[in-house]
Image (tube, rainbow, N blue to C red):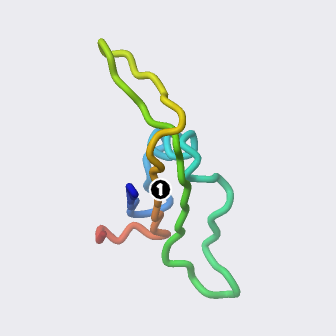
């Protein structure tokens, strides 16, 4: 099993292109994250997605290949940018 973990330091600081790429891959959903839950500050948000689509590269052309080894994507989006990962 393959697990890929991506950590971003700060919800307000994440690069919009990175956020769009992660959303396109299915591992991030806009509008889900909240600053507080039950009047308690949130430290981080965890997103998970498992894909069975692989990719190949031939002559600089990227192609998607279905039914490949499952890859579990974990995305940890820290609420505040603390310059610590």
* Up-down relation of residue 8 to residue 80 (above or below): above
* Up-down relation of residue 74 to residue 58 (above or below): below
- Most foreground residue, 64 or 80: 64
- Most foreground residue, 33 or 62: 62
Which image quarter is the C terminus in?
bottom left
- Most foreground residue, 54 or 15: 54
Crowd tier of the residue under label 1, counting other residues whose Cα lies within 10 Å: few below 14, some 14–19, many 20 or above: some
Seen as rendered, the residue at the extreme bottom is: 39
Locate residue 49 relative to residue 85 in the image: left or right.
Answer: right
Residue at the spot 54% in from the left edge and 60% down from the top edge: 48
Residue 56 in view, yes or no: yes
Say which element carries label 1.
strand
Number of numbered labels in the structure image: 1
Picture quadrant where residue 61 is located: top left
* Up-down relation of residue 18 to residue 44 (above or below): above
* Up-down relation of residue 60 to residue 9 (above or below): above
Q: Name the residue under label 1.
A: 72
Q: Position of residue 41 (x, y in %)?
A: 57, 82
Residue at the spot 49% in from the left edge and 69% down from the top edge: 79
Residue 6 in view, yes or no: no
Residue at the spot 40% in from the left edge and 57% down from the top edge: 1
């Amino acid at each position: 099993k393959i697990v890929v973990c991506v950590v971003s330091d700060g919800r307000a600081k994440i690069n919009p292109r990175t956020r769009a790429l992660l959303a396109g891959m299915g591992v991030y959903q806009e509008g889900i994250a909240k600053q507080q839950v039950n009047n308690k500050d949130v430290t981080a948000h965890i997103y998970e997605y498992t894909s069975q689509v692989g990719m190949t590269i031939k002559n600089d052309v990227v192609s998607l290949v279905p039914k490949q080894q499952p890859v579990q994507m974990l995305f940890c989006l820290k609420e505040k940018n603390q310059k610590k990962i």
